[in-house]
Amino acid sequence: MKANIIVTLKHGLLDPQGKAIEGALKLLDVPGVESVRQGKIFEIELAEQDRAKAQDLLKTACEKLLANTIVENYRIELV
Amino acid sequence: MRAAIILFPGSNREGDVFRALASVTGRAPAIIWHGEHDLPVGTDLVVLPGGFSYGDYLRCGAIAARSPIMDAVRVHAARGGRVLGICNGFQIACEAGLLPGVLMRNKNLRFACHMQHLRVERADTAFTAHYRKFQVIKVAIAHGEGNYTADAETLARLEGEGRVAFRYCDDVGLVGGAANPNGSVHDIAGIYSERLNVLGLMPHPENLIDPLVGGTDGRALFESLLAA
């Protein structure tokens, strides 16, 4: 089974990298860009075939390592 | 005092802190590989040195914080043993749950590398007894992710319990404003754990122990630890 984990900065926290990218997009005349926030995506391949078990396992991975839940949110997508 | 410096892949300030400790205490610290499971018997002080452990992959300090040796460091801290996390070591201590909060990318996105003044917030801890309260010291900083952040409740606790160790200031001790190099909340440069036995700070006191390299303001931190 494959999964994507998307980690993003919590709202309200300053994301200087996102701001810099936003500034660059505006310089490039990409119209209508109002704001950019940068995150991370992890593509994970799992031996586990049971979706509920995979979900639990990935939640553990997020809590233990992939996200710092003080400042980041995570979302698990099984594909 | 028996000190142990933890060496992670990508640490690069272990030599500096080794020299500082050896020079002040007269005793060579042990250097312990991160893959070990135990600290040397009788360790008084654990140092998490600066550097770029694991190339700052994932988040600064995140992977190092999950190293095998960190369980032993947590046990040491829980017993009241002293831990000093400098720069990347501060980031590792936060990621390992030894200290609250997190160090984010510098607000201006620049790597801050210069001499920096700090105000010593209290002089009654094992780390700062050889300073004076509100003494202004000059030490080096060199980091890209030193922007300390914590939630409002944590910050209130840190302030209320007197757990801010150092704040960024200018040469006359005026805290904050342009003297804050990274956007750190409340101009925090370093914090203590609840029992004041763990100190994490972004600046490098270990680099200011010899007049040859521009100052000795860092020396008192190691002298304090020796006397504690």
Image (tube, coloured by chain):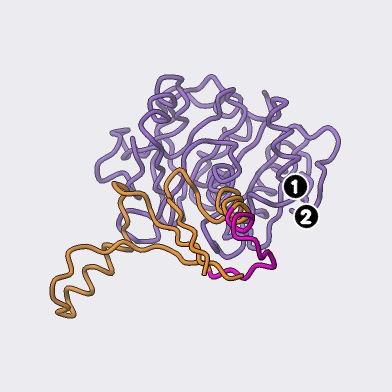
Q: Between marks 1 and 2, how big is the CA–CA gap?
A: 6 Å
Q: Is residue B30 left or right of residue B144?
A: right
Q: Is residue B78 above or below residue B91?
A: above
Colour-to-chain, orange: A
Which residue type does callout 1 highlight?
A: Ile
Q: Local crowd at mark 2 within 10 Å, few (<14), some, or many (≥20)?
A: some
Q: Local crowd at mark 1 within 10 Å, few (<14), some, or many (≥20)?
A: many
The chain containing the residue under callout 1 comes to B
Pinpoint residue B151: horizontal percent, then vertical percent: 39, 35
Residue B35 - label:
2
Residue B69 - label:
1
Q: Quadrant of residue B219?
A: top right
Instruction: Name the one closer to the observer, B47 or B38.
Output: B38
Residue A2 - label:
none
Pinpoint residue B35: horizontal percent, then vertical percent: 78, 55
Colour-to-chain, purple: B
Pinpoint residue B46: horizontal percent, then vertical percent: 70, 39
- Quarter of the image that includes the N terminus of chain B: top right
Q: Is residue A68 left or right of residue A1?
A: left
Regarding mark 1 in the picture, which secondary structure is present there? helix
Q: Is residue B67 left or right of residue A22?
A: right
Say which residue appears at 30% left-offset and 63% top-offset: A18
**In the image as oriented, which residue stretches furthest toward the right?**
B41
Write down the region rendered in magenta: A43-55
Say which residue appears at 51% left-offset and 66% top-offset: A4
